[in-house]
Image (cartoon, rainbow, N blue to C red):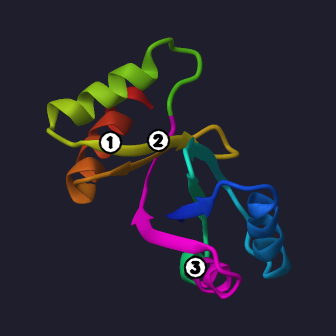
Amino acid sequence: MKDIEIKLENKVGTLALLGETLGKNQISLEGGGVFDNGQYAVAHFLVEEAEQAKKVLEEVGIQVVTIHEVIIQKLRQDVPGQLGLFCRRLADANINILTQYSDHSNQLIVVVDQYEDALRVCKAWMTEWC
């Protein structure tokens, strides 16, 4: 899975075009969101076929800014404060979180500035919490 970062025109029908285009090409969105940024909106979506998604979106005039590797982390829903504890671990390792959202399986999706270091933090987290 990868995160695709998209710059959308902030106008009626743009998100519909994105969804229709991906759907027609059998590309499923597994998580993500769209965030207003004035004239444009910034979207982040989790997809399996990131390069294909980029290709078909650009064919209809939708700008894919970049494709990111993601950290997919399961948090314990029965333990309050998991998000803070996990994010603190990343911060203590000097890893900056660029984007965060959840997928359809209630897993934490994180785009970070130091992917390999974040993988090590995740491995340690899983040993301790799962």
Q: Helix, strand, or loop for circle 2?
A: strand
Residue 56 image position (x, y, % from top left): 67, 84
Residue 60 image position (x, y, % from top left): 71, 82
Residue stretch rendered in magenta on the structure: 52-74
Q: What residue did someone put label 2 on?
A: 100
Name which residue type carries label 3: Lys
Marks 1 and 2, Cα distance to the nearest angstrom? 7 Å
Q: Are marks 1 and 2 in contact (CB under 8 Å)?
A: yes
Q: Earlier in the sequence, mark 3 or mark 2?
A: 3
Q: Write the residue at 78% across / 65% down.
A: 19
Q: What residue did someone put label 3 on?
A: 54
Q: What residue did someone put label 1 on?
A: 97
Name which residue type carries label 2: Gln
Residue found at the far front of this picture: 39
Along the viewing direction, whichever of 59 and 105 lies nearer the viewer: 59
Q: Write the residue at 34% across / 21% down.
A: 85
Q: Earlier in the sequence, mark 1 or mark 3?
A: 3
Q: Pointer 1: residues within 10 angstroms few (<14), some, or many (20+)? A: some
Left or right: where does residue 105 sit relative to residue 36? right
Residue 106 image position (x, y, % from top left): 64, 37
Q: Quadrant of residue 88?
A: top left
Q: Is residue 18 above or below residue 98?
A: below
The image quadrant where one finds the C terminus is top left
Residue 68 magenta-highlighted: yes
Left or right: where does residue 120 sit relative to residue 30? left
Q: Write the residue at 44% across / 25% down.
A: 83
